[in-house]
């Protein structure tokens, strides 16, 4: 298992695409900080009555969905980028191969998630200074941690979902499309469903689950614990499909 | 030693390998011959556990490939030189393979030199010629210093010097007592390289025999064409 993991890590860092993904995440953090700064500048120049109408200047809320998507693409890369024939010749124990890929993606997703959330909430905090709500959405660290934790969990889940779907469909492009539909497409449609499906369906979509996990929604359809379970279910179902495919298929 | 016992593989309605049994012995080069679509590559894939047999089994030194803990140290194989990530550098390709089986990175460097790719170790694989990719595949097969080696059409795309290099390499490996199993469509080349031949057609065994038994009364090509006539695609 140690060798299989070392091999997966070597594979990941010796091709270009992962560096592109990490660079894109970095770019999002920087763009997010710039956005916060623009909002705060606008806020400072507005009369008090308008200031009360401002949305939060916290950029982590804006970049989290993009980071979810990018990390899912990283999961897809780990699943699909090397031909299965060679991967399985080197590590024929398919369960071991799967475990190595899962550990690698989970670790990379957690690290990228923590770094992205820490830097984006940190820079937002710096930019907002001690301005009051609503432009500053949280008072202190105790306030921001549930949200940041929920966001990191969602990034971990989408990374593993990308890996699972990638293993199941064996195509990076198809995986990225499926993940895009799952993260953005379907959640855009569910609020348009007739009652009560609009709420029920939206409640189990990733973008809303993050808020439910953070416990920052008033009167949430799902409790934080139920939302965590639902989020984890995404990863489990995708990894389950990927496992079945990997264990059953010919290389 | 490679033992193939009653091996069968069906893909949907096609029977690629049909109740095939033969043994590949150590210390010899065994040629694996047969028309296009005869099931040679499929058989080799099943030996490596890449494809699941519909029936029967294939054992390497008495064990299933998938049960070997560090398989590259026992079996080296070159099945498809294109089954690599083309954006990776040649040396990095060998490095991850080495890492997967606890083999040192230094061995990867030395092997690249040995196969004549020392000068292109930092080139991305997509920038290598067909023959260079083939050599990289040979290096990958030799990485774990295995007792059993399998090559699927190894001289494909090689220049005359490369063809002789493979022949000498394969002969040398057999003389060291290793088990060598090589498929090819080049009868003249096979006649020079192999000591023993396994001929298949339509997934079935046609003959398993020492080379000299086939070449006693003429060329290997004549004997092969006689045995397989009417049994191609
Ligand atoms: N993955 C697959 N799915 C369906 N059919 C397959 C698959 N792989 C091989 N076959 C079929 O199995 C048969 C044997 O193919 P195989 O590649 O083993 O032949 P071969 O002896 O290696 O031929 P060649 O000399 O052309 O390389 C062919 O009819 C081929 O179409
Ligand atoms: Mg073939």
Image: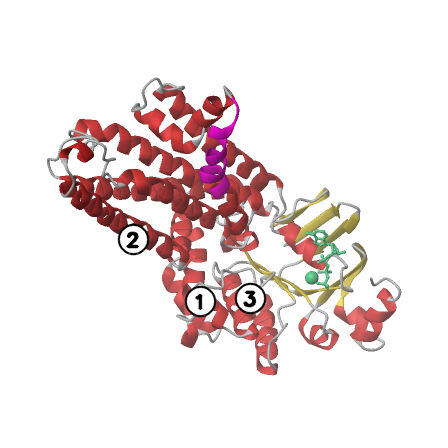
Instruction: From the image, state whether disc 1 or disc 2 is nearer to you.
Output: 2
Instruction: From the image, state whether disc 3 or disc 2 is nearer to you.
Output: 2
- In the orientation shown, which residue stands out farthest toward the bottom? B160
Residue B16 visible in rendering: yes
Q: Disc number at residue B176?
A: 3
Q: Disc number at residue A107?
A: none
Q: Chain of mark 2?
A: A
Q: Chain of mark 1?
A: B
> What distance separates the C-alpha of mark 3 from that of mark 1?
28 Å
Residue plotted at (33% across, 40% down): A64
Residue B214 location in percent, x, y? 81, 70
Q: Secondary structure at mark 3?
A: loop
User: Mark 1 vs mark 2: same chain?
Assistant: no
Q: Is mark 2 within 8 Å of ligand 1?
A: no
Q: Crowding at label 2, few (<14), some or many (≥20) Cα neighbours within 10 Å?
A: few
Front one among A150 and B112: A150
Which one is earlier in the sequence, the residue at label 3 or at label 1? 1
Q: Which residue is mark 2?
A: A27
Write down the region rendered in magenta.
A180-194
In the image, residue A189 lies in the stretch drawn in magenta: yes
Residue plotted at (14% across, 34% down): A48
**Seen in the image, is A29 located left or right of residue A123?**
right
Residue B20 location in percent, x, y? 77, 51
Residue plotted at (48% across, 49% down): B70
Asked if residue B167 is positioned above or below residue A129 in the image, the reply reads below
Asked if residue B141 is positioned above or below residue B120 in the image, the reply reads above
> What distance separates the C-alpha of mark 1 from that of mark 2?
31 Å
**Seen in the image, is A126 located left or right of residue B231?**
left
Q: Quadrant of ligand 2?
A: bottom right
Asked if residue A158 is positioned above or below residue B16 in the image, the reply reads above
Q: Chain of mark 3?
A: B
Q: Which residue is mark 1?
A: B90
């Amino acid at each position: 298992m140690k060798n299989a993991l070392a091999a997966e890590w070597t594979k990941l860092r010796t091709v270009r695409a992962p560096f592109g993904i990490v660079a894109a995440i970095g770019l999002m953090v920087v763009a997010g900080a710039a956005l916060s700064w623009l909002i705060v500048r606008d806020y400072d120049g507005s009369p008090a009555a308008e200031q009360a109408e401002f949305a939060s200047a916290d950029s982590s809320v804006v970049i989290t969905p993009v980071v979810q998507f990018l990390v899912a693409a990283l999961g897809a890369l780990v699943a699909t980028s090397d031909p299965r024939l060679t991967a399985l010749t080197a590590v024929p124990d398919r369960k071991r191969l799967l475990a190595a890929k899962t550990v690698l993606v989970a670790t990379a997703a957690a690290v990228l998630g923590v770094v992205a959330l820490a830097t984006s909430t940190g820079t937002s905090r710096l930019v907002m200074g001690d301005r009051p709500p609503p432009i500053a959405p949280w008072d202190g660290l105790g306030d921001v941690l549930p949200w940041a934790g929920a966001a990191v969990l969602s990034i971990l889940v989408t990374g593993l979902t990308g890996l699972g779907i990638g293993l199941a469909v064996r195509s990076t492009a198809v995986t990225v499309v499926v993940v895009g539909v799952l993260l953005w497409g379907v959640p855009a449609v569910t609020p348009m469903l007739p009652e009560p499906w609009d709420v029920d369906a939206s409640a189990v979509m990733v973008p809303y689950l993050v808020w439910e996990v953070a416990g920052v929604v008033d009167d949430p359809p799902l409790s934080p614990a139920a939302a965590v379970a639902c989020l984890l279910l995404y990863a489990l179902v995708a990894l389950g499909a990927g496992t079945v495919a990997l264990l059953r298929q010919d290389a | 030693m490679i033992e193939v016992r009653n091996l069968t593989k069906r893909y949907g309605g096609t029977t690629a390998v049909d109740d095939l049994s033969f043994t590949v012995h150590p210390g010899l080069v065994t040629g694996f011959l047969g028309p296009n679509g005869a099931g040679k590559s499929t058989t080799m894939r099943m030996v490596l556990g890449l494809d699941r047999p519909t029936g029967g089994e294939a054992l390497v030194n008495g064990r299933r490939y998938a049960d070997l803990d560090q398989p590259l140290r026992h079996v080296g194989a070159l099945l498809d030189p294109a089954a690599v990530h083309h954006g990776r550098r040649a040396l990095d390709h060998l490095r991850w393979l080495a890492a997967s089986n606890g083999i040192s990175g230094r061995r990867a460097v030395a092997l690249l030199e040995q196969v004549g790719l020392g000068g292109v170790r930092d080139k991305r694989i997509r920038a290598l010629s067909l023959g260079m990719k083939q050599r990289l595949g040979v290096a990958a097969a030799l990485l774990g210093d295995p007792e059993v080696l399998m090559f699927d059409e190894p001289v494909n795309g090689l220049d005359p010097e490369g063809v002789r290099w493979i022949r000498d390499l394969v002969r040398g490996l057999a003389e060291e007592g290793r088990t060598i199993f090589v498929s090819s469509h080049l009868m003249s080349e096979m006649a020079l390289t192999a000591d023993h031949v396994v001929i298949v057609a339509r997934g079935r065994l046609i003959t398993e025999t020492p080379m000299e038994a086939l070449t006693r009364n003429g060329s290997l090509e004549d004997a092969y064409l006689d045995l397989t006539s009417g049994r191609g695609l």
